[in-house]
Image (tube, rainbow, N blue to C red):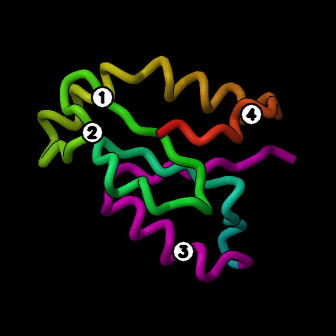
Amino acid sequence: MDKKLYLALGDAGKNIIKMASSNASQYDINKDNILLVNTDKSSLKNEKDYHCLLIGEKILKGHCAGGIKFGQKAIDESISSIINYINNYSNNKKQYNKVLI
């Protein structure tokens, strides 16, 4: 069976995935298969139960992207980290458990 990984992009994605995880059995979601991806370090700081990936550190310095333009730049900057996380997750490597904030 394929492992599902749910990526929550930004605060809106985080809110949606948290709502869906409250119906975990219906959606096959648990905290081990959720990755919160955000440019806002303060938004990820309190998410101790989830895997988190801070992106766009060089251009946004841990602050909110505030929209698509800077969000896209943050993804472009951090695409290798995102791909590495997904590859490690799908290959069942323990490195995916590391919280990257």
Residue 49, position as x, y percentages in the image: 62, 62
Q: Nearer the viewer, residue 18 or 42?
A: 42
Answer above or below: position of 41 versus 59: below
Q: Amino acid at mark 1?
A: Glu
Of badges 2 and 3, nearer the viewer stands: 2
**Label 1 secondary element:** helix
Answer above or below: position of 71 versus 74: below
Q: Residue furthest bottom?
A: 23
- Would you say 77 lies left or right of 60 here? right
Q: Which badge, 2 or 3, is on the more N-terminal residue?
A: 3
Q: Which badge, 2 or 4, is on the more N-terminal residue?
A: 2
Q: Quadrant of residue 22?
A: bottom right
* Marking on residue 90: 4
- Would you say 83 lies left or right of 26 here? left
Task: Calculate the distance from the C-alpha at mark 2 to the C-alpha at mark 1.
Answer: 6 Å
* Marking on residue 20: 3
Residue at the disc numbered 1: 57
Task: Calculate the distance from the C-alpha at mark 3 to the C-alpha at mark 4.
Answer: 22 Å
* Marking on residue 62: 2
Q: Residue furthest right?
A: 1
Task: Calculate the distance from the C-alpha at mark 2 to the C-alpha at mark 3.
Answer: 26 Å
Q: Amino acid at mark 3?
A: Ala
**Label 3 secondary element:** helix
Q: Which badge, 3 or 4, is on the more N-terminal residue?
A: 3
Q: Nearer the viewer, residue 26 or 52?
A: 52
Q: Which residues are magenta?
A: 1-25
Q: Which badge, 1 or 4, is on the more N-terminal residue?
A: 1
